Amino acid sequence: MNLAFVESPVQLLNVLEWAHARPGAPPDVVPEGLGRRGDRGAELTVVVLSPTDPMSRGQLRRMAELARDEGFTVRWQEARGGTGAPLKTVRQLAPMLHRAERIVIGDPFSRYVQLLLTLVGGKDLTVVDDGTATMEFVAQLARGEKLVRWHRRGRRGPREMVLAPVTFLARRRLTPSRSRRVEVFTSMPVEPPPGITVTPNLFGWTRARFGPPKITRGADLVGTSLVETGVVDPDQYVEAVTALARTHGATRYFAHRRESSDKLHRLAVETGLEIVRPDLPLELIARRGPIGATVLSFPSTVVHTLPLALAGTGIRVAVCDISPKWLRDSASPRAQGFLAGVTGTARDVQRLPAPA
């Protein structure tokens, strides 16, 4: 049995892509909206470690329905429902961890996942994309560094010190050994350390199940949570969105699930854009359509994934650079370099300069 732990809609999407891409998976002959049930469903159990924010929960519910339609078992775990929830969750999941032959995870930086990895032992591991964080994870693993999200400054508070042994052991679990194979299933450009297998995520499941999309005139703009993570100044962000929309004729703004309601309201008032809160990851929304002939984005996961999901449709994906002037004083020193790397390594996209 393969056991997957996911905490976001994108992670669950990429678990489905991983299952689809495995050798022996059935061919792509099922019409959109129909599930593909069979022996494969018994091979994978997905555990959703449910987050607390409503947008993520809503998208995860929809993705869970799609996973069940594919014949997979999905277990919804209220992993954050109070102070005792984490330990209760670990106790409940321990028997499943021991029975599993392979563990699939979506976020190696997650403290929750790291705690579960301490119980894994010598089992094979697969890491599926959790967005651009995969690039940083592989780079840190190759350099032998501790696992720290790119937008954090790396300060060690009491909580980090208490969890340091857990993070250290989780990192050992994510390192290949004689008894443990490690795979990274990704659409991102990565250079793994020796011993790690990289399997490309080409979004074959998404393209087989959805589309081709209806294409509208004009452009659509993809939102980002760089303001919410403390990287980009909110005033600068609103000005940049306004300039992009005006220059390229964008009419809709697809909000990131972590964007605040206050910021989205301000964008609607000041830019006139229609704010769309998707009920599924953007790769599926775009593939279903309708979608603009041009999709504009700031440096983010979608500049790597949308060209794959929309391959053959003729839709243009354009990425706008982040000006250093937009960064907040509290932003991590690594922020500018990381964001530039996200843009610079993207394939089949058009580069746009940051609006003046």
Image (cartoon, rainbow, N blue to C red):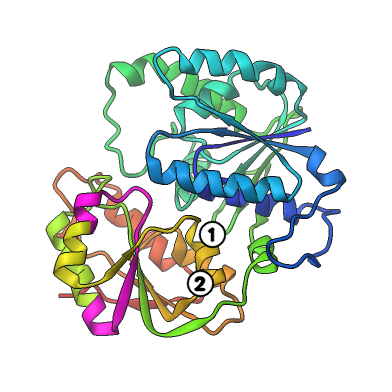
| In the foreground, 292 or 174 | 292
If the image is split into quadrants, where does the C terminus sit?
bottom left
The answer to whether one can see residue 35 in this image is: yes
- Which residue type does callout 1 highlight? Pro
Residue designated by label 1: 189
Query: Are the residues tagged 2 and 1 within 8 Å (C-beta)?
Result: yes
Residue 324 higher or lower than 104, as above or below: below
Q: Amino acid at mark 2?
A: Arg
**Residue 242, position in %: x, y?**
19, 72
> Marks 2 and 1, Cα distance to the nearest angstrom?
9 Å
Residue 46 x %, y %: 65, 37
**Residue 342: x, y in percent?**
41, 60
Q: Is residue 87 above or below residue 231?
A: above
Q: Is residue 159 above or below residue 261?
A: above
Q: Which residues are magenta?
A: 245-264
Front residue of this view, candidates 218 and 196? 218
